[in-house]
Amino acid sequence: MSQVMKKKVGTIIDDALLAGAKQRAALEKRALSGLIEEALAGYLERSPSRDDALRSLAKFTSHGGLLPPEEIDEILEDDALAL
């Protein structure tokens, strides 16, 4: 049986965000650390490049015709890591 290595971390987050997380953990009868760990794992599993590709595809296919060159340039210049 393998053990999962865990490490204690410290950080500063918004009071309201922490209160909401504590409330959700209490509602779900689980540890706050487990809730935060699951949320972080989900965030890291998301594929930004896939999300960007789907957004670009939606732009390209939403017109039913050719896009103007300005819109094509906007899509190509869009920062893939911008939130």
Image: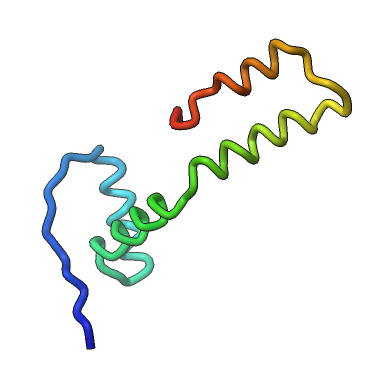
Q: How many marks?
A: 0
The image quarter containing residue 63 is top right
Residue in front for this viewpoint, 19 or 51: 51
Residue positioned 62% across, 17% down in the render: 74
Quarter of the picture containing the N terminus is bottom left
Position of residue 82 measured from the top left corner of the image (x, y, whole percent): 45, 28
The image quarter containing residue 83 is top left
Residue 42 vertical placement versus 6 (above, below)? above
Residue 29 vertical placement versus 67 (above, below)? below
Q: Residue furthest toward the bottom?
A: 1
Position of residue 38 measured from the top left corner of the image (x, y, whole percent): 35, 61
Residue positioned 13% across, 61% down in the render: 7
The image quarter containing residue 57 is top right
Residue positioned 22% across, 40% down in the render: 13
Q: What kind of colouring is applied to the model shown?
A: rainbow
**Residue 53 relative to residue 49: left or right:** right
Residue 8 vertical placement versus 60 (above, below)? below
Residue positioned 75% across, 29% down in the render: 60
Position of residue 50 measured from the top left corner of the image (x, y, whole percent): 56, 44
Position of residue 48 measured from the top left corner of the image (x, y, whole percent): 49, 41
Q: Residue furthest toward the right?
A: 64
